[in-house]
Image: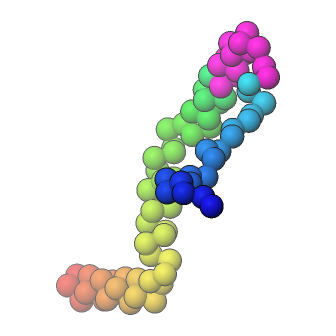
């Protein structure tokens, strides 16, 4: 008969990755490769990255509302032509 009333917890996860098997001297190579990769990503983004992000945000907002957007544009053009 078991009289132990303490809760039984599952064992903690055992993590095993390939990083544990590598020497510490590889860290310099990994850091330099990461730095090169980040510089490459920054150069690809460039100065037009913010413009592309803005255009994507506008597209994501307007695409589901295509018909409404066209109606609003038509109304604005009609008002602009009637005023001019």
Q: For the view shown, which residue lies furthest in the front direction?
A: 1
Please give left or right for residue 64 compared with residue 45 in the image.
Answer: left
Residue 54 higher or lower than 82, as above or below: above
Question: Is 76 or 16 nearer to us in this picture?
Answer: 16
Query: Residue 59 or 70: which is nearer the viewer?
Result: 59
Residue in the picture at 69% in, 38% down: 15
Q: Main secondary structure of the magenta part?
A: helix
Quadrant assignment, res 84: bottom left
Q: Residue at position x 62%, y 22% from top?
A: 35
Q: Is residue 73 above or below residue 36?
A: below
**Point 57% across, 33% down: residue:** 42
Q: How is the image coloured?
A: rainbow
In percent of the image, x 49 and y 69: which residue is there?
A: 59
Rendering coords of residue 74 (x, y %):
37, 87
Q: Is residue 36 visible?
A: no
In this rendering, position of residue 19 left or right of residue 73 = right
Would residue 78 appear left or right of 32 to someone viewing this image?
left
Q: Does residue 76 show up magenta in the picture?
A: no
Residue 57 visible, this orientation: yes
Q: Residue furthest left?
A: 83
Quarter of the image where the N terminus is located: bottom right
Q: Which residues are magenta?
A: 21-34
**Within the image, what quadrant is residue 75 found in?**
bottom left
Q: Position of residue 37 (x, y in %)?
A: 66, 29
Q: Position of residue 4 (x, y in %)?
A: 53, 54
């Amino acid at each position: 008969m078991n009289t132990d009333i303490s809760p039984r917890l599952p064992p903690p996860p055992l993590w095993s990755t390939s990083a544990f098997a590598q020497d510490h001297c590889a860290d310099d190579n990994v850091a330099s490769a990461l730095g090169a990769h980040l510089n490459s990503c920054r150069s690809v983004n460039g100065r037009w990255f913010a413009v592309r992000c803005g255009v994507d945000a506008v597209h994501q907002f307007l695409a589901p509302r295509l018909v409404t957007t066209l109606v609003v544009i038509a109304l604005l053009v009609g008002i602009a032509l009637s005023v001019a």
